[in-house]
Image (spheres, rainbow, N blue to C red):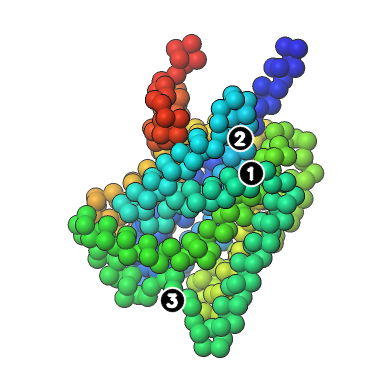
């Protein structure tokens, strides 16, 4: 029995490593996207920074929009749904009550998300995960096929909603202003974010009023759809041994990359061409359908690459294991760089400089996470959330026997 047990543990460890590595990769994409919104009040208003209009500035915006925007939060959401199944399995194996524990975890996530949104970044996703987590809890016994069908139906419904809004815009009723401000509001936001702490928090609260609409109409349901797919994949244990699904992964790549990139180009054109609201709404509809395909192609590619690239896996696993700490610290670092909390460089750096900072932040986090996990079981915020979830203080450092 010992060889069988060892083989099972090896497969499980590889699965967890792949999930952590995917989560680390998602963190990289998230900081590349989020930093643009943290570095400019205009970006949060859906506009390009007026001080940067050189060809290189536009090329960087296009690259980020095509290959990053609206793909990586879907990947993170997929992993949230997948990890939900791991937590269910862990509770069943240990014989502990899952529902109270998970509800405390969601409460902790919501409180962290609320503080994050008010103090650092109104575009927080943690509070959305907390709400979506309640839905996952309610449907935890759903069949994988039903979960996928519901996710597809929800995505198509959202896309149809944007098509209908495009039709309303054609008839003279433009609803785009409900989720984005104009240039005057963006300039006002810039001034507030360069100012004092109370002014920064006040600007965040003002933006939250608009973002709540965006969450309800768009991102929340899209997050739920991705979580349901992750739930279905977790129930089928499809990430347990990706080598067994090479043909499926290859098919996902063949479909996801061409369709996803074409859809992303259309979305980027609708975002940056200065077209009408009709064009913008149709771009949103197309992106809703094609962004998940491109995100899936990223996942399929990495699952095929990880077994052959152990160095890449070893780089991505530590930030993935401390994802919550890194996600929040990304916003903290960016706030110190761009707002009145620190250097107040908002709208003073080009898109290329901003994206380069994002890469540097992730590289620093990957290295720091690796060093931290050599002597600690969890990231700092993960440790705090685990304490809140289990209602008891977890161990901080690794056992001496496991630290070598």
Asked if the residue under mark 2 is in contact with the one under mark 1, i.e. CB atoms within 8 Å, the reply is yes
- Residue 88 image label: 2
Looking at the rendered image, the disc whose residue lies closer to the viewer, 3 or 2, is: 2
- Residue 221 image label: none
User: Does the rendering let one see residue 294?
Assistant: yes
Q: Position of residue 314 (x, y in %)?
A: 55, 31
Asked if the residue under mark 3 is in contact with the one under mark 1, i.e. CB atoms within 8 Å, the reply is no
Which badge, 1 or 3, is on the more N-terminal residue? 1
- Residue 177 image label: 3
Which of these two is toward me, 225 or 20?
Answer: 225
- SS assignment at label 2: helix
Which badge, 1 or 2, is on the more N-terminal residue? 2
Could you tell me how far apart the alpha carbons at marks 1 and 3 are, in whole angstroms? 37 Å
Quadrant hosting residue 396: top left
Q: Position of residue 247 (x, y in %)?
A: 80, 44
Which badge, 3 or 2, is on the more N-terminal residue? 2
Q: Is residue 206 left or right of residue 372?
A: left
Q: According to the image, label 1 marks what residue?
A: 140
Looking at the rendered image, the disc whose residue lies closer to the viewer, 1 or 3, is: 1
């Amino acid at each position: 029995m010992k060889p069988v047990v060892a083989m099972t543990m090896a497969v499980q460890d590889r699965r967890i490593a792949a999930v952590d590595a995917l989560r680390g990769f998602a963190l990289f994409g998230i900081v590349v996207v989020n930093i643009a919104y943290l570095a400019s009040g205009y970006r949060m208003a859906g506009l390009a920074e007026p001080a940067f209009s050189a060809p290189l500035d536009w090329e960087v915006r296009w690259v980020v929009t095509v290959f990053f925007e609206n793909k990586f939060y879907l990947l993170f959401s997929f992993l949230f749904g997948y990890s939900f199944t791991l937590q269910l399995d862990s509770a069943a194996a240990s014989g502990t009550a899952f529902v109270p524990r998970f509800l405390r975890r969601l409460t902790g996530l919501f409180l962290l998300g609320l503080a994050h949104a008010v103090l650092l970044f109104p575009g927080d996703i943690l509070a959305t995960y907390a709400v979506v987590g309640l839905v996952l809890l309610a449907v935890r016994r759903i069949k994988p096929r039903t979960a996928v069908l519901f996710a597809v139906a929800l995505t198509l419904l959202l896309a149809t909603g944007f098509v209908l809004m495009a039709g309303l815009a054609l008839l003279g009723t433009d609803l785009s202003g409900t989720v984005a401000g104009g240039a005057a509001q963006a300039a006002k936001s810039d001034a507030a974010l360069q100012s004092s702490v109370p002014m920064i928090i006040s600007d965040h609260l003002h933006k939250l009023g608009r973002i709540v609409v965006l969450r309800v109409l768009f991102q929340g349901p899209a997050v739920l759809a991705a979580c349901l797919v992750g739930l279905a994949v977790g129930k089928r244990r499809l990430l347990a041994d990706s080598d067994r699904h090479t043909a499926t992964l290859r098919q996902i790549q063949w479909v996801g990359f061409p369709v996803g990139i074409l859809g992303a180009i259309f979305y980027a054109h609708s975002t940056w061409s200065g077209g009408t609201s009709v064009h913008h709404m149709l771009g949103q509809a197309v992106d809703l359908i094609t962004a998940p395909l491109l995100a899936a192609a990223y996942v399929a590619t990495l699952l095929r690459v990880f077994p052959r690239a152990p160095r890449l896996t070893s780089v991505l696993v530590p930030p993935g294991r401390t994802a919550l700490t890194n996600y929040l610290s990304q916003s903290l670092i960016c706030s110190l760089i761009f707002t009145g909390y620190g250097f107040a460089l908002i709208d003073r750096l080009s898109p290329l400089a901003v994206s380069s900072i994002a890469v540097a932040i992730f590289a620093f986090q990957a290295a720091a996470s690796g060093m931290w996990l050599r002597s600690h079981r969890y990231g700092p915020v993960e440790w705090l959330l685990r304490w809140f979830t289990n209602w008891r203080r977890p161990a901080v450092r690794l056992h001496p026997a496991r630290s070598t």
